[in-house]
Structures are given as structure tokens and as C-alpha cells.
């Protein structure tokens, strides 16, 4: 399967600032990626489906203007948390969809965001 | 909607102990079921899967059986090792959806 690199692994930012998280598919051309977030002791929740060259599809309740997703190339999707607030503190994970190639899903190692 | 419920952790066991991590699900269709494992500092990796009722997924000594009557997919291993210490996620994929629905994860700590 693909190698997925997610960066940064941890980030601390001040309230009101923006943070960008990168998800790179190092050896697979990913037309579809997924972004998840996880609050403590809660399920890993799907935020959005990122589609190369088109707009992301957001899950109900996820603010698209707050969580900006850009998937401009087949190897990179970015999630930008804009005007971050402490309640945005969470664990964010990206995933590459390789089911059409028979490899299922490949996940990044996640980003721990803390907003202070 | 779809949901997955798994037992809260952490689960702490001694080496060679028997492991069970419970997982139950709610789905509208006939989902495929998965267990993923996340070792420290790494991404989630597929551990095993089952695609229909009564299927048993197995890998690295871990097993889970798709029980439609109890809507369960419990993870078991007969003898755990320290190297099995990780977070385990139960997940499902329902027909017509592209993404997985996950449980909250269960941290397993195996002590020597």
C-alpha cells in the first residue's frame, strides 16, 4: 500500500491563528483522501472527503469555512484550521483511499492540535 | 445512522494473557467490519477484516468473528505479547459509503 506522511505530528497555536496540516501520499496517486478528527474518548469522526481537483465534501455539522481542505495535486491534501479556538483542540488523521487498487485505506500518523 | 461502540480502555494485561476487546455496531445495511491497530507514532494499520456474517478475520494471532445476530465483532488473542501494546480501533464500512465509521479506540497495555 501507499506510504502516507502527515505533518506536523504535534502543533500548539494561539487562539485566533490558523494552522495547516499536510497529508502526503508518497508513492500513490490519491484522487480521494479522508480527514478524521478524534476528541478524547470519542470515536474517530469523519470530517470530510477530499477530492483531487474539486471541492471537498463535508460531513454534516462540519464548518467548511473553518476547516479548509485543499487537494490540488494527487499527492497532497491540506487541512487548514482557520481562526482556531480551544474547542478545535483535537487529534486529526488523514487517510488515502486505495480500495480501487486493492490496498484498502492507508492512514497518516495523525496530528495533535492544541489551541491555547 | 451507522455507529461503532467499543469497550473503553486502557486494558492492561500481563504477557501471555488472553485478550478480548468488545465491539458492537449499528448499521443500516450489510457492512464490512474491520479492526485497525495504531502503534505509537504510526498510522492506523489494518489488522483484520470480515465482509459477511459468520466470517472470521485473523492475523498475527488475532481473531474476530462477524456476528450478525448480536451485531458484534469482538477482537480476541490467546496470548498477548508486549509488542501488542497499541490502540485498537473497530470500524465498519457500509454499502454506499466511501469512508469508514470508527469506534473510539481501546488502548492495550501489555506488561512483561
Image (cartoon, rainbow, N blue to C red):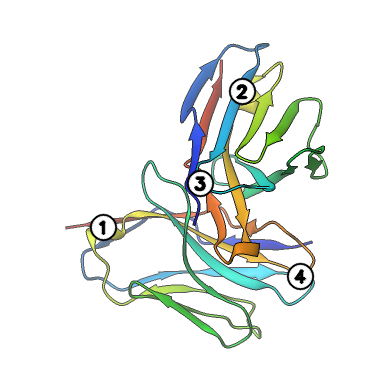
Q: Chain of mark 4?
A: B
Query: Where's residue B112, x and y in %?
Result: 16, 58
Q: Which mark is residue B83?
A: 1
Task: Say if B84 sits above or below A82 in the image.
Answer: below
Q: Nearer the viewer, mark 1 or mark 3?
A: 3
Query: Can you identify the residue that label 4 sits on?
Result: B95
Q: CA distance from mark 4 to mark 3?
A: 28 Å
Please tell me which of labels 4 and 1 falls first in the chain: 1
The residue pinned by badge 2 equals A20
Residue receiving disc 3: A27
- Element at badge 2? strand
* Chain where mark 2 sits: A
Structural crowding at the residue carrying mark 1, measured as other residues with C-alpha within 10 Å and reported as few (<14), some (14–19) or many (≥20): few
- Determine the CA span between mark 2 and mark 4: 32 Å
Residue A7 vs A4, above or below: the answer is: above
Farthest residue toward the left?
B112
Amino acid at each position: 500500500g501507499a506510504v502516507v506522511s502527515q505533518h506536523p505530528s504535534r502543533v500548539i497555536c494561539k487562539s485566533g491563528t490558523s494552522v495547516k496540516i499536510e497529508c502526503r501520499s508518497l508513492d500513490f496517486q490519491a484522487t480521494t483522501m479522508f480527514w478524521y478528527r478524534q476528541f478524547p474518548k470519542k470515536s474517530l469522526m469523519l470530517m470530510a472527503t477530499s477530492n483531487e481537483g474539486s471541492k471537498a465534501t463535508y460531513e454534516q455539522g462540519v464548518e467548511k469555512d473553518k476547516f479548509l481542505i485543499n487537494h490540488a495535486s494527487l499527492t497532497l491534501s491540506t487541512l487548514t484550521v482557520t481562526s482556531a479556538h480551544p474547542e478545535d483542540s483535537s487529534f486529526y488523521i488523514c487517510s488515502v483511499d486505495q480500495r480501487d487498487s486493492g490496498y484498502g485505506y492507508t492512514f497518516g500518523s495523525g496530528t495533535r492540535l492544541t489551541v491555547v | 445512522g451507522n455507529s461503532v461502540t467499543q469497550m473503553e480502555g486502557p486494558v492492561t494485561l500481563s504477557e501471555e494473557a488472553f485478550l478480548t476487546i468488545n465491539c458492537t455496531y449499528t448499521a443500516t445495511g450489510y457492512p464490512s467490519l474491520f479492526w485497525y491497530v495504531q502503534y505509537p507514532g504510526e498510522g492506523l494499520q489494518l489488522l483484520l477484516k470480515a465482509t459477511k456474517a459468520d466470517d472470521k478475520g485473523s492475523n498475527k494471532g488475532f481473531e474476530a468473528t462477524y456476528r450478525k445476530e448480536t451485531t458484534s465483532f469482538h477482537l480476541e488473542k490467546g496470548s498477548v505479547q508486549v509488542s501488542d501494546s497499541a490502540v485498537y480501533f473497530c470500524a465498519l464500512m457500509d454499502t454506499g459509503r466511501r469512508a469508514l465509521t470508527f469506534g473510539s479506540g481501546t488502548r492495550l497495555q501489555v506488561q512483561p
